Amino acid sequence: METKTKHILSFLLIAFFCAASAACANHRNRQNEKSGEQVINSSQKNRSEAGKLAEALRKKGISDKRVLTAIGNISRHEFIDENLRDFAYLDRPLPIEKGQTISQPFTVAYQSELLQLKPGEKVLEIGTGSGYQAAVLCEMGADVYSIERHQELHETAKETLRKQGYHPQLFFGDGYEGLPEHAPFDKILITAAPEKVPEKLKQQLKIGGWMVLPLGGRHGQKMTIVKRESETRFTESVHGDFIFVPMVEGTEK
Ligand code: SAH
């Protein structure tokens, strides 16, 4: 009788554990399915948010389809602080680390449009910042080089871009020096404002190539194109008023 009771008890115990662990596995699976659904839903949501942002920029006058497609494909929220994610797809500049900013999407699109990039062109960006502009240039099929003077921003952007599947060549350094070892460039894009056109960068342009930069002091800048017409001749044209953070000499660790 005692042995029989023991048998019944162990049977009930085993049955209970089996049932319990089956229930757990089921719950876990359902949770996994659910989080899978959530991932799909949120990436669809971000894509449609990015698409809406591209559409808003088109309405504001951006017409280069490759720029708009690039912006529609990029998860801008991945390039900013989590606390600001609600604002990621609005046409606004946002703060990033080190007192810097991720440019307003319209400005990113406008500068990208002025570059008139052809796939495979070699482009140098000054001011990697969050890495968002570099992602746009990668999406447009360019061969992208980018320099950042803040080591921490450089490191963060490197990680973000890799995670998002972009592989530009990123450098920690002073953009005023450019990258003589990789020059000449078809195009150069400056995303911080120098007071004068940086001479060394002019010399790193291909003949027929050009540089897009916000030129001027702290109170505002003119979007400027500096084109290298020949070995020694450069021409300038002006394309509207903007406000950028200043382009600062040297580096910071
Ligand atoms: N393109 C960036 C915008 C960043 S704001 C983005 O998409 O997020 C401008 C950036 O230029 C800042 O990160 C600033 O640190 C950097 N910068 C300023 N002066 C620089 C210089 N001399 N060389 C390299 N980067 C510079």
Image: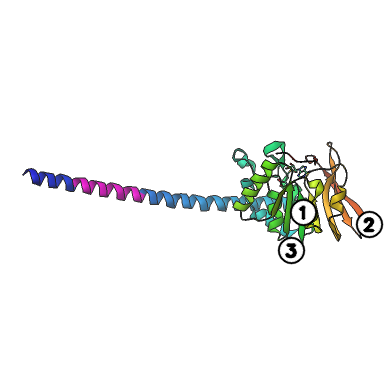
Q: Which residues are magenta?
A: 12-26
Q: Nearer the viewer, residue 119 or 237?
A: 119
Q: Is residue 231 left or right of 245 when viewed as pictured?
A: right
In the picture as drawn, the residue positioned furthest to the front comes out as: 181
Residue 6 lies in what quarter of the image? top left
Give the mark nearer the N terminus: 2 vs 1.
1
Disc 1 Cβ-to-ligand 1 distance below 8 Å: no
Residue with the most extreme left position: 1
Q: Helix, strand or loop at disc 1? A: strand
Residue beneath disc 1: 124
Membership of 23 in magenta stretch: yes
What residue does disc 2 label?
A: 233
Residue matched to label 3? 120
How many angstroms separate mark 3 from mark 1 (CA)? Answer: 13 Å
Under mark 2, the amino acid is Arg
For the residues marked 3 and 2, what is the alpha-carbon distance in whole angstroms? Answer: 25 Å
- Identify whether 232 is placed above or below 84: below
Residue 95, above or below 54? above
Point out residue 107 in the picture as x, y percentages from the top left corner: 76, 47
**Up-down relation of residue 77 to residue 233 (above or below):** above
Ligand 1 is in which quadrant of the figure? top right
Measuring from the top left, give residue 97's x and y in whole percent: 67, 38
Residue at 81% across / 43% down in the picture? 193
Question: Mark 2 falls on what kind of element?
Answer: loop
Q: Amino acid at mark 1?
A: Leu
Is disc 1 surrounded by few (<14), some (14 to 19) or many (20+) residues within 10 Å?
many
